[in-house]
Image: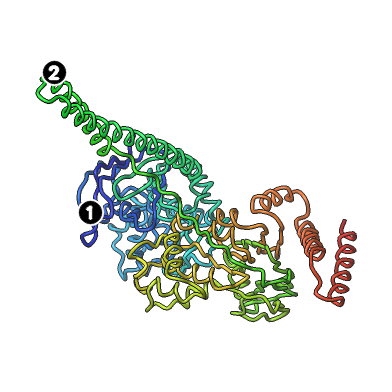
Amino acid sequence: MFIFKAKGLCKEWNGNIIFQNIDIKLQQGEHVALFGRNGSGKTSLLNGLLEKTAFDSGSIQRFIPSDDWGVLEQDPAVDSNLTTLEFVQSAAGKVYHLKKELEHVQTQPEINMEKYTQIYNEFIGLDGYSLDTKAESALHQVKLTSEVWGSSYDQLSGGQKTRAQLARLILQNPECIIMDEPTNHLDKETIEWLEEWLVNYKGAVLFVSHDRLFLDRTAHAIYELNTNECKRYEGGYSAYREQKEVERRTQESTYRKQEQKKEDLLKTIQNYQQWFQQAHKAAGQNDFARSKAIKNVSRFKAKEKELERLENNKVQKPQADKKLNVKLDDSAFSARRLLQIENLSFSYDEEKELFTNLNTSIYRGDRVGVIGPNGSGKSTLLKLITGVLTAEKGGIRQNPQTKIGYFAQELENLDEQKTILDSMLELPGMTQTDARTILGCFLFSRESVFKQISTLSMGEKCRIAFLNLYFSNANLLVLDEPTNFLDVDTKEVIEDVLQAYPGALVIVSHDRYLIKETSNRIIQLGDQGMIDYVGTYDEFLEHKNNATESDPRNDNEIRELKLKLTQLMSMEAEDEQEKEEILYEIKKVQKMLHDKA
């Protein structure tokens, strides 16, 4: 059974076509992702399917009314008087309205018993008194604690709002759910819970997401939305990429064969033309010879028709992915350690300390992915590293040669009166040719480079801020959610660029794919303090799974000591005094490891 079938959908905005000729359908029980670049019209398509906006042309058959679909939106319109608990309960529809009616009747100076009895009996008949229990259970499932249940939905953080919407969907349990960026603002633990919930959800889901691991783990198929088509690919993101690569290779092979065929036809036509001219000249008044010459004319005319058909049905040359071929030089930086964190403690209030006695260092070649649940202090740690915040206890010693570039700060400092191109030309040694090439790699092409920064979307501003930061001559990039607001194409460009960056990186991100692709060291913050792991994200997850049966706190301490020992033994002393200090530290750490073994 189908949930809906849509054919020939078209949407225009201010005279510009966002998309046209779009065919899309959703069957009962399948989980399908809507995928495409920013601005391709994904949210507009969802809103049209939900009947919030109208399509300019096309038809939709809805086999289940859209009013019965569940919805998770990026910015839902919610009554500011609703508490979080009431917002979740409102998913119960009639039962919720009966509950509110009962409460209203009970507050009247004189209760109309006949009306009260009628509402009460209907409420009881629909098992109304289980509503509170069901709503609270759903809120517990998404880990929204009772402290926020009485708060207005408007007062919740972005992550809490998403979780409240998920709780509402659990209570509603619809046959179809439409989700627009469901993983936005969620931490790793909540995303993993959502993945598990969706895998077990029996209804149909159509969702938009740029989270590639989420797509891999939850999508049965992907619709790729472009201006003129919406093509379906079976499987998640990895399967989609494989199919796109097969398409690219097939297109490239077809294009080469087509070009060879075209070349052969042109040569044949040219030969026939020459033969005709020669035969016609030699024939004179000889009718037989003239007839033979005319045959050559018909032959090359036939070949011309064949060439015309080839041109009309030609396959375009596949465009190669643009790569940023820029080699940054880090030879001026000779020291190994960029900065050292010593006994770092910090709190925003007296009740809870975010960090207590954190100790670690950042070295050349480090690509540190900082992970942990929301509220664990990831962004705060970055602000302490960059000097935006000052530690209460302990501190951060920075090598005099270290130059830090901070993404969040770069984004705040964009000069919105400049054009995209002008902002690039201010970078040291940047020429107009280099700037246009680099901007093209970051999906700013042709006339778009002359846009004023104030007119850009948040995703476009993020791209400009990242470029300014990347070419700022910093040798330590500190990136706080650098790929928020970005589509997958741009994320993959940034991943390629970060992998080639010669300096060190410290990245906070909820994008697990980004951490997986760019990190060679993981710092996890949480209730158990800091885990500092040298290795990839996949190796870290495997290590955590293997460590569950042993004492995690002792394992963490041993792991940190081994990391410190590795770092000490690879350090290059700048003088004899520093050499003695390093040897002393090595002996001390070795003794501590021996005591814990």
Q: Total number of numbered labels?
A: 2
Q: Height in image: 322 above or below 402?
A: above
User: Relative to 590, is 180 on the left or the right?
Assistant: left
Query: What x and y, as percent, mark residue 533?
Result: 71, 58
Pick the front one: 40 or 258:
258
Image quarter where the C terminus lies is: bottom right
Query: What x and y, as percent, mark residue 161?
Result: 45, 63
Give amino acid for label 2: Phe
User: Which structural element holds mark 2?
Assistant: helix
- Where is mark 1, residue-wise? 54
Residue 89 visible in the shown view: yes
The image's colouring method is rainbow
Name which quarter of the figure residue 61 lies in: top left
Residue 396 visible in the shown view: no
Q: Height in image: 486 above or below 214?
A: below
User: Which structural element holds mark 1?
Assistant: loop
Query: What x and y, as percent, mark residue 172?
Result: 40, 50
Disc 2: CA contacts within 10 A as few (<14), some (14-19) or many (>=20): few
Pick the front one: 441 or 571:
441
Name which quarter of the figure residue 515 lies in: bottom right
- Where is mark 2, residue-wise? 288
Image quarter where the N terminus lies is: top left
Pick the front one: 90 or 401:
401
What residue is rendered at 29% in x and 40% in y?
A: 5
